[in-house]
């Protein structure tokens, strides 16, 4: 039996963790009596104040938002993107008032359970992607049809209005940049259209912005990777056209899991000051303080010392960029001649100083198998059993409980697979694609007999 190769696992390689930098940060934090005493007691509900300021400054430098520098009042510390997603639902939704949770499909499949935990099992609905990342026209039509139904309104609340001042009528969950699983990136114009739509229908966008910092030119270039463009976040678009005294319609869900290590369990939420303050007032936070308080002091040292940005620039981006190119070259060499397509949508691009740069990044790419082959789950099953190759297949990414999402998957994304370059080294990824090509050749011949 060949050594297993897992192109499904969306984890960073353990050898890429900044262990020495974390050890230094831990020592620096705990050897300072003032920092240590504040780190080991119940922390403030909004999170460790120095880290909130550091994140605000870091994000301002990275995104350069049109609305100007990001104030720390827009930042709350979280226990990571998954924990914060659950926290947002606790605060801003009510299963009796919030009518639908819309999830861009194919979707991050583990998020469905978080929504189900919050009481939305019967209210999950998929929104198709298109080459631009989301079919805004489709969503508008679906909203018009839903709002016209006689049973679409509820006057009953399960949460007291004096405590839960803002409950959104709908939620839209997505990953707009280097999406998991499709790897698509929404253009700026799409994001602007989306903000207009969600304001019209009282929708809260929960945007997983966890892959933005890992980006590079799609093709080799002499340009610095720091210049590789990405669109403004949805929270930036929302902020640029609203005021601080408004609730707002977009929350950016960030995490250090992909750029430090998953085990640190530290993330951040960015939104309007009213959203952020309310997020800090959940019962579990008011009782125990901000999550990951001790680890927050370590992350703050990584940011203020510059070691995190150096790690991203000098370790993560070069490594992932190289792996990405090995994977894409292997796909083009071994899979495309068999009819496999790379289906990651229309590339986002910007032209600066007469140079057009198309960014790639994140953790994943998406491929679609030729139509004459059996379903992707059958291919995945044989790949695992016969070639010790594991990958995430399209049916895994349907919106759970939405029959129409499953139906759409059969005609589109369900015939594909998500491949990750973050876990394995280059040689293993090359071998994985070669194994898949061997299997597909056999299956194509079987289809002809």
Image (spheres, helix red, strand yellow):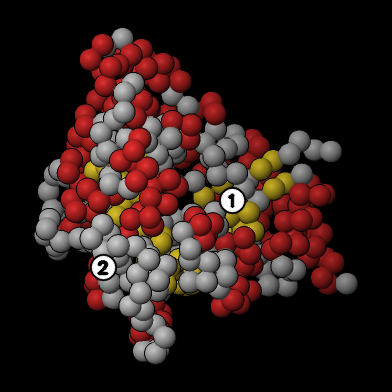
Rendered location of residue 141, percent (x, y)? 38, 84
Q: Which residue is mark 2?
A: 195
Q: Check whether the beta carbons of the residues at disc 1 and disc 2 lie within 8 A of each other.
A: no
Note whether residue 250 is visible: no
Determine whether, in the image, residue 389 is placed left or right of residue 125.
Answer: right
Front residue of this view, candidates 101 and 371 = 101
Q: Which residue is mark 1?
A: 419
Rendered location of residue 89, percent (x, y)? 38, 57
Note whether residue 2 is visible: yes
Residue drawn at (76%, 52%) of the image: 383
Residue drawn at (31%, 52%) of the image: 252
Residue drawn at (42%, 86%) of the image: 151
Q: Is residue 89 above or below residue 265?
A: below
Q: Secondary structure at mark 1?
A: strand
Residue drawn at (49%, 69%) of the image: 124
Quarter of the image where one finds residue 213: top left
Quadrant position of the C terminus in the picture: bottom right
Front residue of this view, candidates 340 and 67 = 67
Quarter of the image where one finds residue 153: bottom left
Determine whether, in the image, residue 236 is placed left or right of residue 169.
Answer: left
Q: Is residue 389 above or below residue 234?
A: above
Front residue of this view, candidates 103 and 322 = 103
Name the mark on residue 75.
none
Front residue of this view, candidates 263 and 410 = 263
Rendered location of residue 62, percent (x, y)? 25, 42
Number of numbered markers: 2
Quadrant position of the N terminus in the picture: top right
Measured in 3D between alpha carbons, the distance from the residue under mark 1 to the one under mark 2, in whole angstroms, is: 30 Å
């Amino acid at each position: 039996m060949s050594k297993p190769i897992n192109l499904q696992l969306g984890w960073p390689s353990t050898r890429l963790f900044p262990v020495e930098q974390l050890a230094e940060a831990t020592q620096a934090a705990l050897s300072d009596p003032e920092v240590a005493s504040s780190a080991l007691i119940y922390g403030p509900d909004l999170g460790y104040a120095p880290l909130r300021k550091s994140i605000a400054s870091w994000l301002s430098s990275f995104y350069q938002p049109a609305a100007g520098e990001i104030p720390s009042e827009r930042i709350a510390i979280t226990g990571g993107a998954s924990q914060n997603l659950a926290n947002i639902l606790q605060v801003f939704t009510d299963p009796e008032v919030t009518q639908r949770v819309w999830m861009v499909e194919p979707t991050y499949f583990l998020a469905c359970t978080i929504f189900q935990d919050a009481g939305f099992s019967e209210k999950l609905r998929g929104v198709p992607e298109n080459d631009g990342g989301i079919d805004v026209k489709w969503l508008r039509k679906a909203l018009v049809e839903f709002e016209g139904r006689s049973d679409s309104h509820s006057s009953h609340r399960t949460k007291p209005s004096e405590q839960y001042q803002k409950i959104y009528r709908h939620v839209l969950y997505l990953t707009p940049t280097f999406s998991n699983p499709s790897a698509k990136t929404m253009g700026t114009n799409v994001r602007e259209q989306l903000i207009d739509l969600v304001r019209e229908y009282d929708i809260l966008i929960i945007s997983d912005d966890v892959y933005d910092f890992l980006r590079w030119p799609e093709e080799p270039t002499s340009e610095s990777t720091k210049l590789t463009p990405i669109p403004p976040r949805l929270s930036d678009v929302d902020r640029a056209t609203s005021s601080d005294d408004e609730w707002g319609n977009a929350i950016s869900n960030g995490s250090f899991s992909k750029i430090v290590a998953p085990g640190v369990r530290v993330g951040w939420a960015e939104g309007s000051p009213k959203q952020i303050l309310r997020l800090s007032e959940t019962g579990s936070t008011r009782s125990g303080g901000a999550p990951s308080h001790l680890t927050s002091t370590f992350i703050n040292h990584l940011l203020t010392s510059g070691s995190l940005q150096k790690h991203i620039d000098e370790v993560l981006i070069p490594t992932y960029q190289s792996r990405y190119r090995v994977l894409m070259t292997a796909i083009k060499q071994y899979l495309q001649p068999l009819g496999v397509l790379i289906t990651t949508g229309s590339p986002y691009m910007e032209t600066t100083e007469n140079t057009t740069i198309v960014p790639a990044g994140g953790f994943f790419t998406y491929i679609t198998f030729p139509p004459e082959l059996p379903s992707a789950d059958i291919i995945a099953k044989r790949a695992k059993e016969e070639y010790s190759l594991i990958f995430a297949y399209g049916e895994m990414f349907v919106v759970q409980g939405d029959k129409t999402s499953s139906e759409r998957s059969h005609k589109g994304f369900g015939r594909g697979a998500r491949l990750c370059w973050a876990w394995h080294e280059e040689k293993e990824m090359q071998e994985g694609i070669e194994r898949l090509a061997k299997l597909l050749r056999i299956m194509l011949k079987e289809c002809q007999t």
